[in-house]
């Protein structure tokens, strides 16, 4: 009998399973990171207009020209470096497809891919789907990277390192000094930096610095981002890749055979939003999330969790060890069923489940009213 060799050992997405748990038991879903509030009106109107204008057939496989041009302009606007929309930009079906397309294009069997943990749950499986070996480097939540330990993880087999900044689930924002050391290691070992920067505009502390902007890294960095988090449209599945020309050529071939292309009318709408929304939109986005962060942090600390305010993204990784001796999955399920608030078990972000057994992750990409209701449920619940 044939077996699914490349997916052996995979588990179903814990994050999406917790959404189903929340739906079944009527819990407030602070597990999966999708907003419950409206996307910008200009974005929605542009999508409606594109559909009515019959932008309903295949776009160019690697992305509608208007959106690729808008992406290139955004890198000049925000980070001050030039991107060629025809040679460097690829549009994908979300950042999730972007990450696996990049890996399949650039990583070969038996290569090693370094992944900092805790990590977004797709990164390890992405490497395994390439028949590569994920090499996990622990980063203690709330602390910076142990750069000596990271240096020791590089080897002659290292093909790439995956970076996520701001980070899901910890909220850590990579500092310039961390990025410079990582960049030097990539250059020394001839490795790619694959950076997931989907939360680039949800920042509370520090500065978002694209790895591609550092000296010597432009031609060995692939930058992944997208519309989902910035415009609150996680269901639209419009992702972006910026890469050197030779890498783009390879990535586009993989992308073509994976999905052909992202939704054409939604690409037009995202382009309109990128062209027209001003600095005030992005400032308000970060300010609104800061308010939500502070609200949920206060509630979690008041309920007995140990956690630190994230510097970016919209998640809080919380330690519940002073509340319960249960493992993270049992605790998360009980919290959903009996307190009516659903988090994600922390073990889903670690290669060794034991490292996350005392942690759960909460998403605060919800309306303030819903977060207030979740806070009240936590205050009223037993959870001990």
Image (cartoon, rainbow, N blue to C red):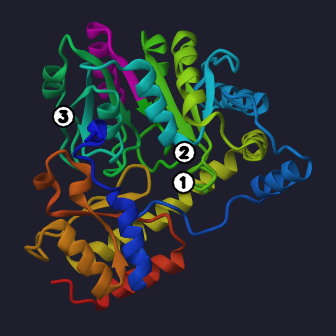
Q: Secondary structure at mark 1?
A: helix
Q: Earlier in the sequence, mark 1 or mark 3?
A: 3
Can residue 124 be seen here? The reply is: no
The answer to whether 288 is drawn above or below residue 185 in the figure is: below
Region of the chain picked out in magenta, as a range: 175-194
Q: Position of residue 378 (x, y in %)?
A: 31, 83
Q: Position of residue 228 (x, y in %)?
A: 58, 50
What label does residue 286 carry, if any?
1
In which quadrant of the rendered image does the C terminus lie? bottom left
Residue for badge 2 = 201
> 32 left or right of 248?
left
Q: Position of residue 76 (x, y in %)?
A: 65, 25
Instruction: Give the residue drawn at x 48%, y 30%.
Output: 101
Q: Secondary structure at mark 2?
A: loop
Mark pair 3, 2: CA separation: 26 Å
In which quadrant of the rendered image does the N terminus lie? top left
Q: Nearer the viewer, mark 1 or mark 3?
A: 3
Mark pair 1, 3: CA separation: 29 Å
Q: Looking at this view, is 31 or 281 the one in front?
A: 31
Can residue 34 be seen here? The reply is: yes
> Is 185 covered by the magenta stretch?
yes
Residue extending furthest toward the left: 325
**For mark 3, does the 10 Å Cα neighbourhood hold few (<14), some (14 to 19), or many (20 or more) residues?**
many
- The image quadrant of residue 91 is top right
The answer to whether 23 is drawn above or below residue 314 in the figure is: below
Decide whether the magenta segment is chiefly helix, strand or loop.
Answer: helix
Instruction: Give the residue drawn at x 26%, y 50%.
Output: 349
**For mark 2, does the 10 Å Cα neighbourhood hold few (<14), some (14 to 19), or many (20 or more) residues?**
many
Mark pair 1, 2: CA separation: 7 Å
């Amino acid at each position: 009998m044939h077996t699914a060799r490349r997916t052996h050992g995979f588990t179903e997405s814990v994050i999406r399973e917790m959404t189903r748990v929340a739906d079944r038991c009527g819990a407030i879903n602070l597990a999966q990171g999708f907003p419950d509030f409206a996307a910008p009106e200009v974005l929605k109107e542009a999508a409606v207009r594109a559909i009515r204008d019959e932008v309903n057939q295949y776009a160019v496989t690697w992305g509608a020209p208007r959106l690729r041009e808008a992406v290139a302009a955004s890198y000049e606007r925000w980070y001050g470096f030039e991107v060629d929309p025809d040679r460097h930009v690829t549009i994908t079906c979300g950042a999730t497809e972007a990450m696996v397309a990049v890996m399949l294009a650039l990583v070969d069997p038996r290569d090693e891919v370094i992944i900092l943990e805790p990590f977004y749950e797709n990164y390890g499986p992405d490497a395994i789907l390439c028949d590569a070996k994920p090499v996990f480097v622990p980063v203690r939540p709330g602390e910076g990277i142990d750069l000596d330990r990271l240096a020791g993880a590089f080897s002659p087999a290292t093909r790439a390192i995956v970076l996520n900044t701001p980070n899901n689930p910890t909220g850590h924002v990579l500092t310039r000094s961390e990025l410079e050391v990582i960049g030097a290691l990539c250059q020394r070992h001839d490795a790619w930096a694959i950076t997931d920067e989907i939360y680039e505009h949800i920042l509370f502390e520090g500065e978002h610095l694209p790895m591609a902007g550092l000296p010597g890294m432009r031609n060995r960095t692939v930058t992944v981002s997208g519309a989902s988090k910035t415009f609150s449209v996680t269901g639209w599945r419009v992702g972006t890749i910026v890469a050197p020309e030779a890498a783009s050529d390879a990535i586009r071939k993989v992308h073509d055979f994976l999905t052909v292309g992202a939704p054409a009318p939604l690409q037009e709408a995202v382009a309109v939003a990128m062209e027209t929304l001003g600095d005030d939109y992005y400032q308000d986005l970060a300010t609104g999330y800061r308010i939500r962060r502070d609200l949920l942090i206060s509630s979690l600390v008041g309920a007995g969790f140990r956690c630190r305010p994230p510097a970016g993204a919209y998640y809080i990784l919380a330690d519940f060890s002073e509340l319960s001796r249960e493992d993270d999955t049992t605790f998360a399920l009980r919290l959903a069923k009996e307190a009516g608030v659903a988090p994600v078990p922390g073990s889903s972000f670690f290669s060794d489940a034991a490292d996350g057994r005392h942690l759960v992750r909460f998403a605060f990409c919800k309306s303030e009213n819903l977060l207030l209701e979740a806070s009240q449920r936590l205050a009223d619940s037993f959870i001990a």
